[in-house]
Image (spheres, grey):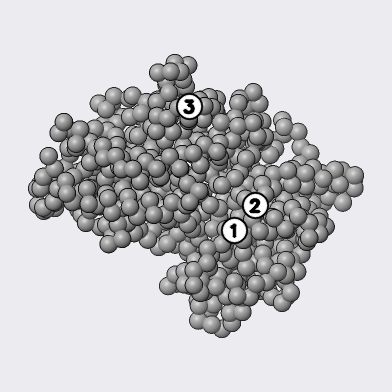
Amino acid sequence: MLTETILHSSPDSDYTSPAHFLTSPTTLDTAIDRARVQLLGLQNEEGYWVFELEADCTIPAEYILMMHYMDEINQALQAKIANFLRAQQSVDGSYPLFKGGPGDISCTVKAYYAMKLAGDSTDAAHMLKARAWILAQGGAAKANVLTRITLATFEQIPWRGVPFIPVEIMLLPKWFPFHLDKVSYWSRTVMVPMFILCTYKVKARNPQKMGIAELFVTPPDKEKNYFSHVKTPLGKAILVLDRLGRLMEPLIPGVVRRKATAKARDWFMARLNGYDGLGAIFTAMVNAYEAMDCLGIPADNEQRRIARESIDRLLVIKGDMAYCQPCVSPIWDTGLVALTLQETDRRQRDSHTRQALNSALNWLAAKQLKDEPGDWRNRRPNLPGGGWAFQFGNSYYPDVDDTAVVAYAMVQADEQQFAESIERAGVWIAGMQSSNGGYGAFDVDNTCHYLNHIPFSDHGALIDPPTADVSARCIMLLGKLVNRHPEYKAVIDNCINYLRNEQETDGCWFGRWGTNYIYGTWSVLTGFEAAGVPKHDPCIRKAVAWLKSKQRNDGGWGEDNDSYYDTRNRGEFHTGTSFHTALALLALLSAGEAGSPEVEAGVNYLLKNQQSDGFWSDESFNAPGFPKVFYLKYHGYDKFFPLWALGRYRNERLAECN
């Protein structure tokens, strides 16, 4: 039975004094029921859950910049976004990529420009602080490539301050070192309309003719160090080719340019994706909208009108503040909530929960992508479709990670109505394995790492290579299907070998899509459990020891995005978070640690930190979009992951008692 536990540990295990924790069945049941009821109340009538997906201030700033680029300024909305931007500024005047993080020059430049466009005086205290910080970093010329492209369109820097990316790139053969098939889906969708904007050196309408000359240490026209960040031999060689390309550009025949432009136009127009937008991601959607304007597509054109509306659907407006999301996450959220509710309902059947799950899984089944065209088919032309996207709609880009989660929830539902969906998902997942045994998020063998060293890719996120977290969820699914599909065993074995090779020396795994090593370790341990890896396996025991070593004095776990910069900080934060505590608990429970004092302490951390509304609240950003470049806060993670952990814990302890 669940009883009061007294923990005595040495300082090495993070427990410095005896502590009393009360974990009674009644307390646990009450906490689970409160959170479950609240979570059920957030389900949309169509069956899905979707929570806010917040990024740094780059995205809302870019929304204001887009309005001024197009001269489509909504003053009331602009004022609300400006209010949001002011509220996010750090004490030193900068804007970070995640809450509590260091200032970022590109984000701060865009936020400053957006607030100035919104009417903020350059003499206002917050503007003075931002400007001083930017100048101390070397000025706006030090901003990243994407920011400099924006500044070039607003005529704030010369076009020589950005890489030469002519639209003729569209005509390069597949064997060429650079080709669209060699970069990630997010890079493709952002770049193709950008090729048009850069080739034709578009100019923002900028009706107020507002500039930011005050943010440059050296006048932009005289600046000679726009590419001082390029250090590698490959990067420097490409800069030489860049200069040659600019010199030779006038020699490009008009017929070739027109052909390339038409190919770029046809490529992104075919993928406009209706009200969900190109790639269903903000930056690609804005680039497509502006490229349509550049190409002379009239404002009353139906596709252009829908492209504009797709951007507005990303807005979150609350009172006198507003921000813009980078995308939305309904399928991911719904899949994870389904797994959470299945866990809470495993031993205590609740009719409302069962009804909600049935509605959610039926909604998900209708969203499965089967015979639709998709860029993933370039590598797997004969593989039948069967994946799910991340967003409401993104038919060209099903997500391997989402597919594994959704199909796993359907397997656990054990309903005949989902049999076909599960079968298709299993075949698709097995067929999307990369040659090293791992899985990328959207493509197979998207591993041309040299592309991350070209001048355009100063963010280092141009490709979509296999990662431990996605790979682990793939074997999580396939492990449940292998008894009926023995052909999956070789796929699983290859992936397990990949994951063994990816384990860090201290026992953890890197987290590509969630922060960070705690997320990665949770992913792999749950994958290993489903795939049948014995709990005494050395890899698992090493990971368990690492997790226990990172537990805090209060029983919780936490991790900061700083661990993407300094691996010495992995698995650590100045405070515990409900999200990371839940992940650590789920990982330990997957490893057979239900009766350990560390698990008991973690459970009590969640019980003590549950809010009156039944949920938990974490302030920190909890996932990277791209490590070191772009971070996210999934607003649902502190709502359902703790519930999932408590539900799993209850089920494990009840199983022990039976």
Please give the name of the residue rendered at 50% of the width and 32% of the height, measured from the top-left corner.
Answer: 439
What's the residue type where badge 2 is placed? Tyr
Rendered image: mark on residue 275: 2
For this view, does 490 lie left or right of residue 367? Answer: left
Residue 400 drawn above or below residue 31:
above
Please give the name of the residue rendered at 55% of the width and 38% of the height, measured from the top-left corner.
Answer: 366
The image shows residue 190 at horizontal and vertical percentages of: 65, 49
For this view, does 194 lie left or right of residue 395? Answer: right
The image shows residue 23 at horizontal and vertical percentages of: 15, 48
Could you give the CA–CA distance between mark 1 and mark 3, rounded to whole angstroms? 34 Å
Rendered image: mark on residue 313: 1
Rendered image: mark on residue 419: 3
Q: Earlier in the sequence, mark 3 or mark 2?
A: 2
What's the residue type where badge 3 is placed? Ala
Rendered image: mark on residue 36: none
Could you give the CA–CA distance between mark 3 and mark 2, rounded to whole angstroms? 30 Å
The image shows residue 32 at horizontal and vertical percentages of: 27, 49
Viewer-nearest residue: 232 or 567: 567
Residue 188 drawn above or below residue 486:
below
Q: Residues within 10 Å of mark 1 (few under 14, many from 20)?
A: some
Could you give the CA–CA distance between mark 1 and mark 2, rounded to whole angstroms? 8 Å
Please give the name of the residue rendered at 47% of the width and 72% of the height, measured from the top-left corner.
Answer: 87
Please give the name of the residue rendered at 61% of the width and 63% of the height, measured from the top-left corner.
Answer: 62
The image shows residue 221 at horizontal and vertical percentages of: 73, 67
Q: Regarding mark 1 in the picture, which secondary structure is present there?
A: loop
Viewer-nearest residue: 236 or 133: 133
What's the residue type where badge 1 is placed? Arg
